[in-house]
Image: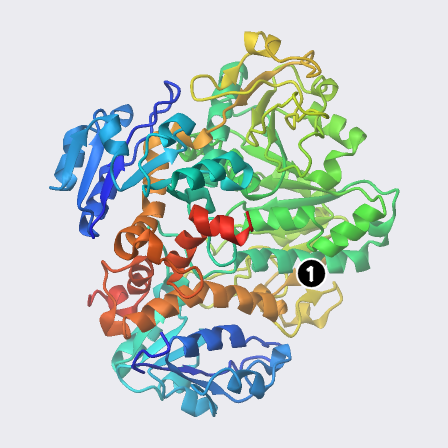
């Protein structure tokens, strides 16, 4: 494909969110884009959070160019993992395509803004196969990174964890869905394969994971019983009604004092919304890529909205973006998932060449487009 | 040159009812198949009449089994067997679950006959993830059948005063993940809704993986508290049993055992290969439920111990229990495979620079598969 006419340009701006956001697309993906014959404009400093140098990208191909943040937004296709701020994508030219996690179904104001700008868009989180299965998703790392952090915290709160004479570790997990299923596997491995191997070498007993779904999670007596026995409590639930907590703060008193709460749901507090959204486990802080472990005396509890009960506290592992904890494997996965989709987009010559009845990946892209979302196609 | 397609039936046990569905025929037509020959009776096991296939394409016709085998491309889910493969002509493309990795004799046969085998179980993405598989149905179908049996023997299955049902799942991998989710829903979302509406306590699933299943005291205590024991393990060493038959005695008398791993016994090797739970029979689509007094137990040869028995479920192909749903999944998954074969031709595939699915199909084609492994 190297001789293909250069019909598209790609811009890869960096994500200037919190300091802990270290993710950028890897040289392997940028190299593929260049191999497919498109000019790629990457923002200087790309990959630096993961130890890459500008030269690692520039050396890939003459088609790779180092540019400023603003210049990266002037390409035909702007590719970035998290949705940029409105002020950033407002600089895109009409007809260009924003390719990012746009969450169109829950962001009507963003949909309108993009339409007003005449910008095309493909929402990574809406890219699905013909059966509705997401093709760009890192639910495994949500679960594994979150459970790993919880066991990191447990090593601090429960020194007995490393005692060869101890009983099996007990984890209770609510919500065996897409994230929860990975959470179960991660929990059986102490959240980390190396830790599991180390414990196995030392002859330590493994982990028993008790899993319940909605038909038991509302049973207060049973949940309190499970909480009393849990060393780690993992919330991977999906609530029907986000205005009600799954675990009221009062129930947390049942957890042993050394227990750790692992929050894989990471719903925010939106108390002003109607109806309001409260956190699934009431009275725990929400973490981010700058801090994701909170001991009971952490000042983060004091920053929770007034009126949220926080009387009962345990160590908490919470992060709104668990995959970002380990940026490299996260971006390797996203790069692999995105590569065939970007290849299809390039082969189609951009948005105008995508057809709802096209190839497997064309169809997936089409379904995820702003055009399809607003019913223009 | 446009290729013709043959869709023969699978003449295995009577319970094998699966055939590809009419939408695949329509797809093959749209992507340039010269002719599509379906065997007489195709789809009948799922209640799909031949007219539905003929309506799907003007280029579809009904033929004999032999006529199906005479086409350029023969598509059949399960490997049709050595004798049938010998009937294929040189250069035929055989698209099927060939399991080349564990069946070296098939590799040799296909190579000797000049047949382009495309192994559906070998169609993988660049990371090695299978693109044609149905592990979800393994978990869900097995668990659903197990709960049907529990409902028959549990006196208060639907009563709001009963305690939560207790499932123990051995293994937390791909099959286990689906089994766990299915178990929290009785393997049946509708039943789950009905039970929830009647305020019947649900299901608690306890998962133990290999770093705990060795712990005899833990396991015996666990088994004593188990209503349904699921084997969803993937053992590195199939000669090592996870639950010896003597441990089965710890299960309550009315407990049910579900085998999702479907590892076979093989006593012709030393040490013998065993099932993860010792002493349960091997099932198939004709029989997959075994009461403790079923003669199948007595048919298991020494050194397999069968003294302790519970109602057991085992089936080598759990997805086939819901043939239509199964083939909807497989049909959708093989469409892009067939498109590559029809549009690119098997000889032109490039496993390095081709498109995503071209690379995937190339990796699964027997001559390239063989070349990569230096055989």
| Residue located farthest toward the left when viewing the structure as drawn | B58
Kindly indicate the quadrant of the structure image that contains residue A1.
bottom left
Residue A377 or residue A44, whichever sits in front: A44
Of B138 and A116, nearer the camera is B138
Q: In this view, does A24 lie to the left or right of B53?
A: right
* Location of residue B356 (image quadrant): bottom left
x and y percentages locating residue B259 in the rendered image: 57, 27
- As drawn, A274 above or below B268: below
Residue located 44% across and 41% down the image: B111
Q: Where is residue A166 in the image (x, y as percent from the top left)?
A: 85, 43
Is residue A240 among what the camera can see? no
On the image, the x and y values in percent for residue B240 come to 72, 30
Tell me if mark 1 has few (under 14), some (14-19) or many (20+) residues whose alpha carbon lies within 10 angstroms of its own.
Answer: many
**Chain holding disc 1:** A
Query: How many numbered marks have been drawn onto this rendered protein structure?
Result: 1
Q: Nearer the viewer, residue A149 or B113?
A: B113
Q: In the figure, A57 relative to B71: above or below?
A: below
The residue tagged 1 is: A149
Q: Is residue B141 left or right of residue B208?
A: left
- The local secondary structure at tag 1 comes to helix
Q: Which of B56 and B115 is in front in this view?
A: B115
Q: In the picture, residue A17 is in which quadrant?
A: bottom right
* A242 up-or-down from A218: above or below: below
């Amino acid at each position: 494909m190297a001789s293909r006419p250069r019909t598209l340009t790609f811009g890869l701006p960096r994500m200037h969110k919190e300091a802990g956001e270290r993710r950028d697309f890897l040289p392997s993906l940028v190299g593929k884009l260049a191999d497919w014959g498109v000019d790629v404009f990457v923002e200087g400093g790309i990959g630096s959070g993961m130890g890459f140098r500008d030269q690692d990208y520039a050396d890939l191909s003459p088609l790779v160019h180092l540019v400023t943040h603003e210049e990266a937004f002037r390409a035909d296709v702007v590719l970035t993992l998290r949705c940029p701020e409105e002020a950033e994508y407002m600089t895109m030219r009409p007809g260009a395509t924003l390719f990012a996690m746009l969450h169109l179904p829950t962001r009507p104001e963003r949909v309108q803004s993009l339409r007003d700008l005449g910008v095309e868009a493909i929402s990574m989180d809406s890219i699905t196969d013909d059966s509705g299965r997401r093709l760009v998703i890192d639910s495994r790392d949500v679960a594994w990174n979150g459970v790993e952090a919880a066991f990191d915290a447990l090593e601090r709160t429960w020194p007995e964890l490393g005692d060869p004479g101890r009983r099996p570790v007990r984890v209770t997990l609510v919500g065996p869905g897409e994230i929860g299923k990975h959470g179960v596997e991660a929990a059986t491995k102490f959240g980390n394969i190396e830790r599991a191997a180390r414990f196995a070498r030392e002859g330590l007993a493994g982990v028993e994971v008790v899993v319940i779904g909605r038909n038991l999670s509302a049973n207060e007596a049973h949940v309190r019983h499970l909480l009393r026995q849990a060393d780690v409590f993992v919330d991977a639930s999906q609530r029907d009604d986000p205005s009600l907590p799954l675990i009221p703060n009062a129930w947390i008193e049942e957890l042993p004092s050394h227990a750790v709460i692992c929050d894989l749901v990471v719903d925010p507090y939106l108390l002003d919304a109607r109806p309001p959204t409260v956190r699934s486990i009431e009275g725990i802080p929400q973490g981010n890529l700058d801090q994701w472990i909170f001991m009971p005396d952490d000042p983060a509890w004091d920053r929770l909205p007034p009126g949220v009960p926080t009387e009962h506290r345990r160590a908490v592992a919470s992060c709104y973006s668990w995959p970002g904890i380990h940026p490299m494997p996260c971006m390797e996965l996203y790069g692999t998932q995105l590569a065939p989709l970007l290849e299809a987009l390039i082969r189609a010559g951009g948005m105008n060449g995508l057809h709802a009845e096209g190839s497997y990946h064309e169809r997936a892209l089409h379904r995820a487009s702003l055009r399809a979302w607003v019913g223009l196609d | 040159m446009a290729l013709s397609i043959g869709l023969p039936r699978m003449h295995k046990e009577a319970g094998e009812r699966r055939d590809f569905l009419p939408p695949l025929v329509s797809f093959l037509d749209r992507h340039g198949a010269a002719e599509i020959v379906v065997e007489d009776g195709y789809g009948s096991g799922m209640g799909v009449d031949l007219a539905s296939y003929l309506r799907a394409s003007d280029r579809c016709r009904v033929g004999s089994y032999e006529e199906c085998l005479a086409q350029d491309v023969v598509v059949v889910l399960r490997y049709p067997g050595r004798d049938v493969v010998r009937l294929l002509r040189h250069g035929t493309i055989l698209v099927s679950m060939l399991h080349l990795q564990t069946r070296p004799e098939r590799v040799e046969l296909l190579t000797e006959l000049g047949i382009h085998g495309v192994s559906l179980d070998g169609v993988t993405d660049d990371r090695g993830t299978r693109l044609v598989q149905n592990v979800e149905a393994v978990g869900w179908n097995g668990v659903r059948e197990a709960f049907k049996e529990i409902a028959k023997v549990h006196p208060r299955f639907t009563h709001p005063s009963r305690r939560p049902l207790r499932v123990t799942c051995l293994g937390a991998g791909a099959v286990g993940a689906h089994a766990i989710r299915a178990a929290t829903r009785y393997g049946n979302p509708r039943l789950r809704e009905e039970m929830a509406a009647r305020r019947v306590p649900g299901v608690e699933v306890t998962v133990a993986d290999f770093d705990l299943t060795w712990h005899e005291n833990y396991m015996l205590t666990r088994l004593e508290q188990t209503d349904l024991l699921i084997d969803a393990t993937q053992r590195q060493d199939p000669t090592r049993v996870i639950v010896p038959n003597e441990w089965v005695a710890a299960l309550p008398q009315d407990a049910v055992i579900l085998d999702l791993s479907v590892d076979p016994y093989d006593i012709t090797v030393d040490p013998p290969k065993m099932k993860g739970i010792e002493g349960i029979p091997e099932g198939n689509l004709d029989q997959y439920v075994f009461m403790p007094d079923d003669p199948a137990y007595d048919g298991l040869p020494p050194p397999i111990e069968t003294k302790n028995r519970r109602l057991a479920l085992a089936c080598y192909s759990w997805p086939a229990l819901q043939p239509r749903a199964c083939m909807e999944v497989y049909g959708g998954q093989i469409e892009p495979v067939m498109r590559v074969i029809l549009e690119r031709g098997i000889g032109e595939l490039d496993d390095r620079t081709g498109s995503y699915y071209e690379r995937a199909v190339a990796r699964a084609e027997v001559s390239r598969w063989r070349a990569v492994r230096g055989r």
